[in-house]
Amino acid sequence: QKEVEQDPGPLSVPEGAIVSLNCTYSNSAFQYFMWYRQYSRKGPELLMYTYSSGNKEDGRFTAQVDKSSKYISLFIRDSQPSDSATYLCATPGTGNQFYFGTGTSLTVIP
Amino acid sequence: KAGVTQTPRYLIKTRGQQVTLSCSPISGHRSVSWYQQTPGQGLQFLFEYFSETQRNKGNFPGRFSGRQFSNSRSEMNVSTLELGDSALYLCASSLGHGYPTGELFFGEGSRLTVL
């Protein structure tokens, strides 16, 4: 079992839609969770991170962690064509090793 | 502030050859990590170097190796290339201390194709 599993998608939504991206993780000891965004032919960049359970909001983006079900979510409100990218969930393991999901490809259609 | 620089961006090799990839981290970052990204497996951790020492290693065969220089620049080497080594190789730098060890800043990657 992989440390982090992610819905593979791809997702295609109309502009303005609410997008829900989801991951599950295996180890209840994980406490930090990150969402990275990767545009085509670019490296991933950190979008936001959360600690433990609860929600964190940043503009149109909300990250949610449910530790009881080991579930991580990223919601995008009022999605824009510029949000079209691959979204990766991640959590740090021992040392500086991060475990990443396989990524969900999102396309927002104008 | 300059970002993480990886060279070369694209390269094509044949089976059995070896390849060396280079990474220059953000100034002041002492940790450099390497990841392999493929469509089926996503990002998989190769190894991490901090102050010229390998601190952590993923589950890759010994054909994959790396090193870090005193200026924090890092190289990774893959010997005896196989078709399955075709991937995007990403380098990430971070401050490297504390938990979690700070944000990973990724380069744009080196895309390796093995024929």
Image: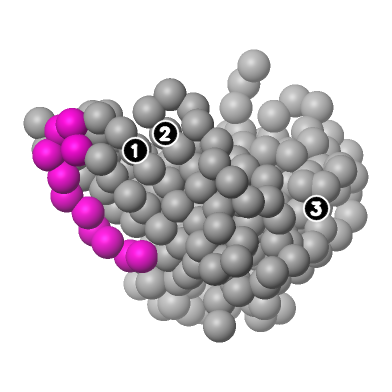
Chain letter belonging to callout 3 = B
Chain letter belonging to callout 1 = A
Q: Residue furthest top?
A: B1
Q: Which residue was labeled with disc 1? A: A76
The percent position of residue A36, horizontal first and vertical second, equals: 49, 44
The percent position of residue B109, horizontal first and vertical second, equals: 49, 46
Task: Report the front residue among B48 and B62.
Answer: B48
Q: Which residue was labeled with disc 2? A: A61
Q: Main secondary structure of the magenta part?
A: loop
The percent position of residue B34, horizontal first and vertical second, equals: 64, 55
Alpha carbon separation for disc pair 3 and 1: 35 Å
Do residues under tags 3 and 1 come within 8 Å of each other at their CB atoms?
no
Figure label count: 3
The quadrant in which residue A42 appears is top left
Q: Residue at x 80, y 52 (%)?
A: B49
Task: Give amino acid for label 1.
Answer: Ile
Q: Which residues are magenta?
A: A7-17
Q: Residues within 10 Å of mark 1 (few under 14, many from 20)?
A: many
Q: Is residue B3 above or below residue A49?
A: above
Q: In the shown orientation, is residue A46 left or right of residue B27?
A: left
> Regarding mark 1 in the picture, which secondary structure is present there?
strand
Q: In the shown orientation, is residue B16 left or right of residue B61?
A: left
Task: Give amino acid for label 2.
Answer: Phe
Q: In the shown orientation, is residue A53 left or right of residue B48?
A: left
Alpha carbon separation for disc pair 2 and 1: 5 Å
Q: Which residue was labeled with disc 3? A: B49
Task: Report the front residue among B53 and A78.
Answer: A78
Q: Residue at x 41, y 77 (%)?
A: B83
